[in-house]
Amino acid sequence: MNRAELWMIILGGMAVTYLIRLSFFFFIPPDRLPEWFRRGLRYIPPAVLAALIVPDLLLLDGTLHLSFANHRLVAGSIAALVGWRTGNTWLTIVSGLLTFGLLTLL
């Protein structure tokens, strides 16, 4: 596979993904969707974020590692606690990064 083919695959995938998402809003106006369905759609971003982050926090070298030696889990737990208590995204990110950095240095 040469570079041009690779870029065509990437751009084609982007176009297909965009068109699928656009068709959902283009063909079905959001105000015609049932209220329970619209409420459910609000949970998709947090669910996807959790699906991306949680395996990285819990797995260390491909195995489940639930201890204080897992710096990612400790830092992620502290960041989640800060985010839950404050609701501040930047403070959550900074607290997680600082915790991870300090644990790594120690």
Image (spheres, helix red, strand yellow):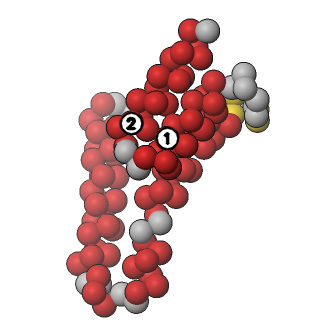
Residue 91 bears which disc, if any?
A: 2
Cα–Cα gap, marks 1 and 2? 7 Å
Q: Residues within 10 Å of mark 1 (few under 14, many from 20)?
A: some
Type of the residue with mark 2: Leu
Instruction: Residue 59: tell me if it is visible.
Output: yes
Q: Label 1, on which residue? A: 82
**Vertical order, 38 against 96 (above or below):** below
Q: Secondary structure at mark 2?
A: helix
Who's the residue at 42% across and 68% down the image?
42
Q: Secondary structure at mark 1?
A: helix
Q: Quadrant of the N terminus?
A: top left
Q: Position of residue 20 (x, y in %)?
A: 33, 68
Q: Residues within 10 Å of mark 2 (few under 14, many from 20)?
A: some
**Vertical order, 4 against 23 (above or below):** above
Marks 1 and 2 in Cβ contact (< 8 Å) = yes
Q: Find residue 53 and report its image quarter.
A: top right
Task: Looking at the picture, tell me which residue is in the foreground, 75 or 52.
Answer: 75
Q: Quadrant of the C terminus?
A: top right
Task: Looking at the picture, tell me which residue is in the foreground, 76 or 13.
Answer: 76
Who's the residue at 53% across and 24% down the image?
99
Q: Position of residue 23 (x, y in %)?
A: 28, 74
Type of the residue with mark 1: Val
Instruction: Residue 61: tell me if it is visible.
Output: no
